[in-house]
Image (cartoon, helix red, strand yellow):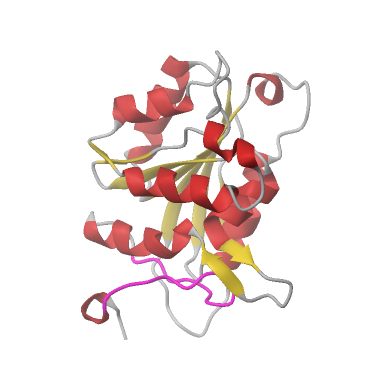
Amino acid sequence: MVNSGIHLFKSMVMHEPARIGLVSISDRASSGVYADQGLPALRDWLGAALHNPLEFEARLIPDEQAVIEATLIELAARCCLVLTTGGTGPAPRDVTPEATLAVGDKEMPGFGEEMRRISLNFVPTAILSRQVAVIRKQALIINLPGQPKSIKETLEGVRAADGKVTHVGIFAAVPYCIDLIGGTYAETNETVIKAWRPKTATRK
């Protein structure tokens, strides 16, 4: 298990603190066979993408459905957003989607659909990914791919050589979804990802 960490950002504007759960799911990484790359990738991307002071609750766990379910239940009780990485393929030990669906109150299928569509810009095997997203009480839980490059692409989107976004990432919809379920008002760095909200839901 990885210890929780707090990442604070300096800003002239007061932003609401956000607690985010990060879960890397891998038999080999959790047993020390190789170093986990998922948690650092998530921390780095969120740190660049959000203006809010962030408190991360990080966990590195094996591909065991009961362990995944218990971890998601624990984190959803304290966090407005829980992001998982790993365990979403077709292999027998890949059970992250099953565990996520088991603890969710509502499924949010659009997130998984869009992640696969983004990844298809790069590899045809994206259709083998089974990422899902659910709402549990006042937390949004999203399964992400296992590779750092794919994590960034699905969250941030696809960019052309000149840096222009050609396919918007899923995180553009995350802050408003969290608003709707009563979570923290998340404010993004628009040079990384621009959150979309209707004007009536945008704070001045």
* Up/down of 174 relative to 60, above or below: below
Q: Which residues are magenta?
A: 185-198
User: Looking at the picture, how far across and down is residue 114, in whole percent?
Assistant: 45, 51
Quadrant in which the C terminus is drawn? bottom left
In the picture provided, is 111 more to the left or to the right than 200? right
* Up/down of 100 relative to 137, above or below: above
Residue at the location (70% across, 20% down)? 28
User: Residue lying furthest top in this view?
Assistant: 92
Residue at the location (62% across, 25% down)? 26
Quarter residue 61 falls in = top right
In the picture provided, is 168 more to the left or to the right than 81? right
Quarter residue 37 falls in = top right
Q: Nearer the viewer, residue 122 or 186?
A: 122
User: Magenta includes 192?
Assistant: yes
Residue at the location (69% across, 50% down)? 149
In the picture provided, is 126 more to the left or to the right than 41? left
Can residue 3 be seen in this snapshot?
A: no
